[in-house]
Image: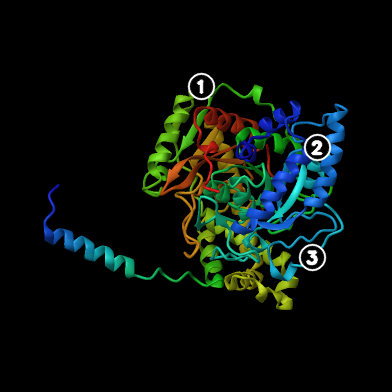
């Protein structure tokens, strides 16, 4: 019974509130205790916020008693990557030099969730500075390496390592992560949870650690695609405090998705053959047949030819070095856990303006090419990562599917959902669409999840 | 497919050699930035192209 609760989706938890099977206070106590006990075992917990959450849970219960319903997230506990500020509590950005940093304001995404009655029970661990210097080891965090709940000898993925582990291990029903290039998709894939990287600008980044202004996004990591829709509905919207805001709102409307038979899904055959880890290929092949079985029209395609990795790295390193210039100049950058990060940040300050501007101009061509590609296609599908998580002790040098940097450069939304196992560890597919096509992506993954149970599998916690 | 002891030994020895080969050292970040810039410089860029900072729906 209790275990079912820890792995319940948001609608399932709502049902328990409605039947008075459990109260918000009881649910918050159960999850908080679990997060505090098990979180450190995965190096997933940055800061427990139990007292604060319990106080708010009492208010939620009073509201529910008076039948004042605020929506599906009311009374649902959650966690947030420790890159989002929460007023008057430490926000470490996963990095020792910022271990005692406290802001007097709360990130917009957290403030929006607070309004819905969702209960923040803890800040979750992350790769230091979201890996802005180009981290090479899983241990690049003041919290230690993110450990994968499916096997603690393996990495949880990064940089949203805590959200990935915590959702997978049933320590929180959902979490907020962030992505500059791969930081939601990777831990979601490695930990077997469903993660959504929204269109650039759809979710305010006010109160979030900046790493690369033109690339950073905040998004949900959940148990299902449907849960991602509900959380995105709550956190999206224009924000004058975020200069990158698209001033658009997302409404989760699963009933209005296009007929799957009318959709053309592009895939690159190489991604599923020579690109993919041989151990993961059967799972990917099986997943593609499920998509075909849904009526989706899968067509072979190729991504436009660009040096995506080089572009995203050059842009993020230049912007990141500018953001962290005071840290670099002060020498405190040497306190980072991964020495490669310090070297990478210093090198970022030396990138000539002409290289950065050229990269941003080529990025315009990338965006144009994707608009052209989407004239014939509705969605792209690829492995979220080519294989399962790597060992904690191994350097992080596995290549990533080009759709990750490409989608981030073009500001496109993507959704990662589990599709099987390889060597006992989860693997996942990612689907990527036009800007602001999140409802379409969620509808596809939601249908996939009614036909499979990979997202329901539980690690041996 | 038929395996002889010789081919099996050969494949095992080959695998062992591969396993003992240390991974190539990753380039230093400054060098990597140069490599990245060189790769980007190869993309033909029309003169009128402006930097990307906005995203269209």
Element at label 1? helix
Q: Is residue A247 visible?
A: no
The quarter of the displayed image where residue A354 is located: bottom right
Query: Which of the two labelled residues, at mark 1 and mark 2, occupies the earlier sequence position?
Result: 2
Task: Kindly report the distance in space between the C-alpha atoms of the residues bearing marks 1 and 2.
Answer: 36 Å
Task: Kindly report the distance in space between the C-alpha atoms of the residues bearing marks 2 and 3.
Answer: 27 Å
The quarter of the displayed image where residue B29 is located: bottom right
Task: Indicate the chain on which mark 3 is placed.
Answer: A
Element at label 2? helix
Question: What residue is shown at x 50% (from left), y 62% (from top)?
Answer: A392
Q: Do dots 3 and 1 share one subunit?
A: yes
Question: What residue is shown at x 71% (from left), y 66% (from top)?
Answer: A322
Q: Do dots 1 and 2 share one subunit?
A: yes
The quarter of the displayed image where residue A128 is located: bottom right
Q: Is residue A133 left or right of residue A21?
A: left
- Residue A222 to residue A376: above or below: below
Across and down, in percent, residue B12 comes to 22, 62
Residue located farthest toward the front when viewing the structure as drawn? A1
Mark 2, other Cα within 10 Å: few <14 / some 14–19 / many ≥20: many
* Along the viewing direction, whichever of A224 and A68 lies nearer the viewer: A68
* Along the viewing direction, whichever of A213 and A237 lies nearer the viewer: A237
Q: Is residue A416 visible?
A: yes
Say which mark, if any, is on residue A116: 2
Residue located beneath label 1 in the image = A261
Quadrant containing the N terminus of chain A is: top right
The reply to whether callout 3 and callout 1 are in contact (CB within 8 Å) is no
- Residue A412 to residue A206: above or below: above
Task: Indicate the chain on which mark 2 is placed.
Answer: A
């Amino acid at each position: 019974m209790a275990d079912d609760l820890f792995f319940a989706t948001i609608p399932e938890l709502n049902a328990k509130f409605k039947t008075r099977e459990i109260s918000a206070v009881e649910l918050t106590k159960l999850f908080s205790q679990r997060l505090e006990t098990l979180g450190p075992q995965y190096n997933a917990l940055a800061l427990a916020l139990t007292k604060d959450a319990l106080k708010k849970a009492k208010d939620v219960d009073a509201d529910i008693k008076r039948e004042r319903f605020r929506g599906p997230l009311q009374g649902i506990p959650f966690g947030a990557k420790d890159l989002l500020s929460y007023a008057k509590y430490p926000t470490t950005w996963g990095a020792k030099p910022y271990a005692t940093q406290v802001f007097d304001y709360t990130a917009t995404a957290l403030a929006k969730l607070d309004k819905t009655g969702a209960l923040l029970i803890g800040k979750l661990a992350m790769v230091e500075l979201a890996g802005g210097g180009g981290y090479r080891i899983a241990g690049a965090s003041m919290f230690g390496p993110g450990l994968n709940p499916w096997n603690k000898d393996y990495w949880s993925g990064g940089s949203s390592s805590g959200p990935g582990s915590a959702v997978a291990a049933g320590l929180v029903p959902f979490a907020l992560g962030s992505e500059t290039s791969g930081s939601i998709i990777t831990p979601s894939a490695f930990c077997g949870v469903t993660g959504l990287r929204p269109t650039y600008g759809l979710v305010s980044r006010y109160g979030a650690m900046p790493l690369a202004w033109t690339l950073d996004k905040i998004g949900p990591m959940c148990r299902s695609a449907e849960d991602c829709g509900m959380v995105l509905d709550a956190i999206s919207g224009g924000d004058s405090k975020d200069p990158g805001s698209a001033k658009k709102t997302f409404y989760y409307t699963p009933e209005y998705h296009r007929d799957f038979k009318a959709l053309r899904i592009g895939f690159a055959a190489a991604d599923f053959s020579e690109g993919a880890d041989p151990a993961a290929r059967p799972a990917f092949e099986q997943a593609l047949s499920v998509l075909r079985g849904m009526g989706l029209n899968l067509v072979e395609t190729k991504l436009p030819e660009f040096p995506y990795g080089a572009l995203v790295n050059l842009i993020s390193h230049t912007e990141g070095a500018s953001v962290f210039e005071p840290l670099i100049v002060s020498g405190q950058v040497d306190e980072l856990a991964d020495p490669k990060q310090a070297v990478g940040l210093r090198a970022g300050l030396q990138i000539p303006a002409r290289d950065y501007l050229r990269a941003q101009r080529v990025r315009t061509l990338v965006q144009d090419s994707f608009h052209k590609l989407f004239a014939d296609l509705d969605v792209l599908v690829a492995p979220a990562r080519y294989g399962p998580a790597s060992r904690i002790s191994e350097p992080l040098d596995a290549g990533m599917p080009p759709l990750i940097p490409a989608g981030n450069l073009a500001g496109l939304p993507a959704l990662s959902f589990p599709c099987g196992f390889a060597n006992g560890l989860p693997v996942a597919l990612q689907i990527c669409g036009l800007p602001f096509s999140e409802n379409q992506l969620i509808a596809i993954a939601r249908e996939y999840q009614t036909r499979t149970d990979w997202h329901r599998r539980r690690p041996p916690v | 497919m038929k395996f002889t002891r010789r081919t099996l030994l050969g494949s095992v020895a080959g695998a062992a050699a591969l396993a003992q080969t240390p991974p190539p050292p990753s380039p230093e970040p400054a060098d990597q930035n140069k490599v990245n810039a060189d790769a980007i410089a190869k993309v033909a860029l029309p003169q009128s192209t402006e930097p990307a900072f906005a995203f269209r729906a």
